[in-house]
Amino acid sequence: MEKSMQKYLDKAEVLIEALPYIQRFNRKIIVVKYGGSAMVDETLKERVIQDVTLLKLVGFKPIIVHGGGKEISKWVGKVGMEPEFVNGLRVTDEATMELAEMVLGKVNKSLVQLVESLGVRAIGISGKDGKLLSVEKKYADGEDIGFVGEITHVNADILYDLLEKDFLPIVCPIGLDDAYQTYNINADDAACAIARAMKAEKLAFLTDIEGVYKDPDDPDTLISELPVTEAEALMNQGYIGGGMLPKLQNCIDAIENGVSRVHILDGRIPHCLLLEIFTNKGIGTAILNDTDERYYQGE
């Protein structure tokens, strides 16, 4: 009897630990960049959407910005084309652009379907709708990589209107330039630009890495909370490399443009969003302003 009672008491403790965070973030905007393996595995996909739906139902105002790189690469291979990347950006010719837009549209509506099945109203929109995402051509170190866009403007009013009417917006990272040409947009960049434009309280990246490590070879060096100046120091000292470098730079840009906290999470961990946001230590890395209060003070 005591054991079974303890189990319920433990559950109550978890809920109580979450209470100050629910109070703190009530009616606040959180942008979730959803990508990586968590988009491919159906069970993980369901859990991520459950997390975002729960965030909405306890008072957050979530916006999902999704990628679809693995799915695009799969279809590019299926039609006999070779995926090509320069500095992590997909080289996008006309045929690849057409394919990417079709695949991202399919991904977008599958996420809408999942959210709706959990009783929350969702709307999937492309960055082309209402010129949500205006872009100009992006170059990779001066190299032309085709129809890849750099965001110049976010029409935030569209998203504010959807949130006001109690919808959960799900954004597909496709944009238009001034000549109404379609461009593919890196989903990390799209999430950052939307978080800045919406003055989001939080921006969360679901990735295939656990967070930021002081030493990538030592799992015990995962950093729970990382002020911007420390993040810049780690980058300058060469501790951060590979795909984490542009991601961390995006995080710093978001913080410097008014986003309160940016979280880097391993989307392969079930319910990683809830564990990060509603517990003191969290399970990933939170990037914060140097003047911000730390939630976690160490063991």
Image: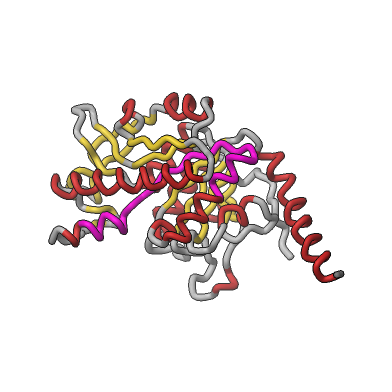
Identify which residue is drawn at 56% across, 50% down.
51
Does residue 145 appear in the picture of this structure? no
Q: Nearer the viewer, residue 214 or 134?
A: 134
Q: Which residues are magenta?
A: 51-75
**Across the whole image, how many numbered discs are drawn on residues?**
0
Residue 255 percent location from the top left of the image = 53, 42
Q: What quarter of the picture does the N terminus occupy?
A: bottom right
Identify which residue is drawn at 62% across, 33% down.
27
Q: What quarter of the picture does the C terminus occupy?
A: bottom right
Which color scheme did the rendering employ for the protein?
A: secondary structure
The furthest residue to the bottom? 217
Query: Does the magenta portion include 179?
Result: no
Residue 59 percent location from the top left of the image = 63, 37
Q: Is residue 42 left or right of residue 280?
A: left
Does residue 50 appear in the picture of this structure? yes
Residue 136 percent location from the top left of the image = 25, 35
The furthest residue to the right? 2
Identify which residue is drawn at 34% across, 33% down.
133
Is residue 69 positioned above or below 26 on the image?
Answer: below
Q: Is residue 69 left or right of residue 28?
A: left
Q: Nearer the viewer, residue 297 or 127?
A: 127
Query: Does the magenta portion include 53?
Result: yes
Residue 173 placement: quadrant: top left
Identify which residue is drawn at 20% across, 52% down.
91
Residue 4 percent location from the top left of the image = 80, 68
